[in-house]
Image (spheres, rainbow, N blue to C red):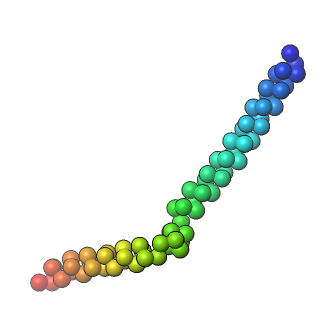
Amino acid sequence: MGTTTDAIRQEIEQARSRLGQNLNELEYKVKREADWHVQYDRRPWVFLGAAFGLSALIGMLVTRRAV
């Protein structure tokens, strides 16, 4: 009976260790995917288009107030 509980305890500790490693890996991947530098490197044209669209929108709002 003692070896069975020790074996179960060891399995639980191994599962905790694997879970901790998986959690660390997931945290790294989420941080990497949320980093705007990584996204810019992957899709520079999207950022350029968004910047152009935002500047056009701001330009339209400013010219409406000036008129």
Residue 30 quadrant: bottom right
Determine the image quadrant of residue 46: bottom left
Q: Is residue 31 above or below residue 38?
A: above
Furthest residue toward top: 1
Residue 32 or 49: which is nearer the viewer? 49
Residue at 83%, 26% (x, y): give it: 7
Tell me if residue 46 comes above or below residue 63 in the rendering. above
**The C terminus sits in image quarter:** bottom left
Number of numbered discs: 0
With 31 as the anchor, is 8 left or right in this view? right
Q: Is residue 47 left or right of residue 37?
A: left
Kindly identify the residue that appears in the image at 69 percent across and 44 percent down.
20
Which residue sits at x=52%, y=71%? Answer: 42
Q: Is residue 67 left or right of residue 18?
A: left
**Does 55 sit above or below residue 11?**
below
Where residue 38 sits in the image (x, y, percent)?
Answer: 55, 69
x%, y% of residue 26?
A: 61, 51
Which residue appears farthest toward the right when viewing the image? Answer: 3
Which residue reaches farthest left? 67
For residue 67, side relative to residue 12 (left or right): left
**Image quadrant in which you'd find residue 51:** bottom left
The residue drawn where x is 67% and y is 47% is 22
Point out residue 16 in the picture as x, y percentages from the top left corner: 72, 38
Q: Quadrant of the N terminus?
A: top right
